[in-house]
Amino acid sequence: MEELAAQRTWTEEERLELAAQLDADLDAFIDGLEKKRYEEGWPEDRWQEEMDKHPFFMKRAPQPGDDVHPMFEGLQKLKYDPEENTRDELALNYKEDGNFYMKHKKFRMAIYSFTEGIKSKTENPDVLAVLYNNRSAAHFFIKNYRSSLSDAQRALFFKPDYTKARWRSAQCAYELERFDVCTQMCEELLEVDVDHKEANALLHKNKMKKLEIERNQRKEAAEAKRRLTRFHRLRDAIEQRAIKFDDQRVGKKAALTEELLQPKFLPLEDHSVHLDEDGSTLVWPAAFSYPEFLFSDFQQKLPETATMQDCLATLFAEPLPCDKAQSYRQGNVNVYYENRKVGCVHKVAVEKQLAEIIAEKGFFVSGGALLFYVVPKDSRVEQEFIHQQRRPMVYS
Amino acid sequence: MDTVRELVQFMQPNQRLDLKAVALTHVLGLTGSSEGKSAILSLDEMLMAIFGLTYDENQTVAKDAVLSLINLTAEEEAAIKVFQLAKQVQPTFAIVEVAAKHVTDEQSDLADPWSMVLSNLTRVESLVHEILGTLEKDEQTLPRLAKAFAQLDYNKKKAKLHYLAPIFCNLTQLCCHRKYQLLEKLLPFASFEGSVVRRGGTIGILKNVCFDVVYHDVILDEQGSILVAILQPLCGPEEFSDEDNDLLPIELQYLPESKTREEDPDLRKMLLECLLQLCSTRRSREILRSKGVYEILREYHKWEAKVAKDSDCLLACENVVDILIKPSIQANLSS
């Protein structure tokens, strides 16, 4: 070739000859190469499948579990490999991913991406500020207000004049009812831009909510105090009368609790013993049990000043439906109460006031209420009732 | 007199530190007595020397110089003299600007003393207008002063800046700058337990504001935070019924047992005078009634009569209550 190149002028013929020579050389070279079939191409019948797998032509992203095309893996490596990218580039790549997910409302994926970006340990404060701010936005949309606030504050740490992050902090603080933080953020926003309408509105809304919550707390406290005073007065009244309770532990000076005074009978549930408006008379819930019929009448509010006579009058104002023989009438019945500790019954003197009956040695308040048994006078029912086997209560 | 003149030469900026310090200490002592003050005030060069030393690098010297100025400006005539001289000297001693600069400087050790000087100066009616003009030259100054006042830990060198309250109070005597954004920030301090100066100044501001009828609409608006600031120190721990509580502004509902009233009778009287001013139109009276002011004053009167027993306050309270409980009998006030 050198001799040819040395020649200065070429004739047309010589050029054509050279061209043909070069062609022939190339053909010879190619023929000299090992003959192999091209096998890496896509088989004709499956070309569409292959297209779908190719990273450049795929129509949907690979889902977890899919086989991944080696080229795809290669691209991934390029994008995410710490050795291929500087920390900044890596961080920005993740940031782009995150933003992409945000646009498509895949907030958890966005959080993941931004987190990876933060983990890249870039030292650039602007990049970090954006990553934290954007992650804060993602958290905000899925209502993770605490995480959102924390990220927004970090963003402010890296970029103190980051208005978006400050505004988001204010909103999160409001949702979290951290009123002072919200106020501070809003005021900082207004220092920079006096006309920030949303900040003004939020400042106001925040203040109103804070005042309301504070007032509700005070109201609660006042009511709790009232309840407590009422209970103490009730407790004092009961202790003064030395009233005995079935469920109270004997011997120790057991404290009177609200639990002890809570009626166990369903119809009496909401009517536990209390002081009347004057604060002088106890008002009791009571159960009147009919052993003959195995059912009970309930009286929700009996003043201790009422006599048993009065109670019977009320009970039998109208005859009991199950009382076919009409034997349950005011003058025709006897009233008893049980002394469970000893295992016997005591007859009630019906002229007595409830207060006096309760004060009797063998009377115990049972299940937060007064419990009486009513039987017709001189009846078999009465005899059976009196002689029924009762065992004294075992002390715990 | 001659001693004073002799001291001047030792109070020049380029003098030895120990000489300056001793001379200044002596001067400071002189400002404690009225003869001493007159002696100093009659000698312009001495005043100029003091002005100069407020710039001294040595903090003790500078502080003593400012403390001297506090004493020198305590009385009206003296304050005027100091102020005028500061303007006349060459170069001008921009006393107001310097004071404002120190008060708004988070790192200044001299913020409190300078605030007291400014407080003294603004108390003089003939000077207030001019001082305000100077402060308003830079539109950032007043907002920054407000921030310094409202943010309790503003000054990092532990200055309390309580005297900003009387400064604002004096400034609000002029009607042109009752700016409400400023006021909102200052309101909580009407109940500030830590300093009677702060409280007193704030309540003074409230009183000045109430004296101008034009502002009653703003004071008695929806928000009502100014009204709350006036009422809060007068409210006590007594329980109101649920219906009465509902009338009151939300901040004053269900106050706890621990709530105490304003302990200084002069301040209580000022608050009652605010309320009296607010009663001047029929509309305002109706608003006050609808917010439970009568109920609050009823309990307050009981407490004042039984516990605090200040007759001026009782009278002031009765004046307001009398007007409030007479709905249809119109007093000879404008409707």
Image: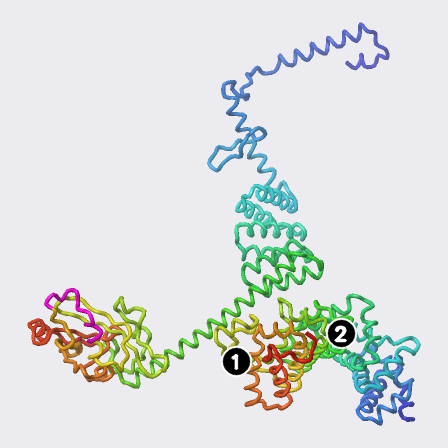
In the displayed structure, A207 sits above or below A344; it is above
- Residue A363 located left or right of residue A150: left
Q: Nearer the viewer, residue B310 or A82?
A: B310
Quadrant of the drawing holding the C terminus of chain B: bottom right
Q: Which mark is residue A206?
A: none
Say whether marks 1 and 2 touch (CB < 8 Å).
no
Q: Amino acid at mark 1?
A: Pro
Tag 1 residue: B237
Residue B59 x, y percent position in the rendering: 78, 79
Mark 2 lies on a secondary structure that is helix
- Residue A341 located left or right of residue A33: left
In this rendering, which labeled residue sits more in front, label 1 or label 2?
Answer: 1
Q: Chain of mark 2?
A: B
Residue A176 x, y percent position in the rendering: 54, 60
Q: Nearer the viewer, residue A292 or B159?
A: A292
Tag 2 residue: B103
Q: Chain of mark 1?
A: B
In the displayed structure, B314 sits above or below B168; it is below
In the displayed structure, A335 sits above or below A266; it is below
Q: Residue furthest right?
A: B90
**Residue at x 71%, y 58% (from the top left corner):** A193
Q: Nearer the viewer, residue A148 or B233?
A: B233
Mark 1 lies on a secondary structure that is loop
Q: Which residues are magenta?
A: A312-325
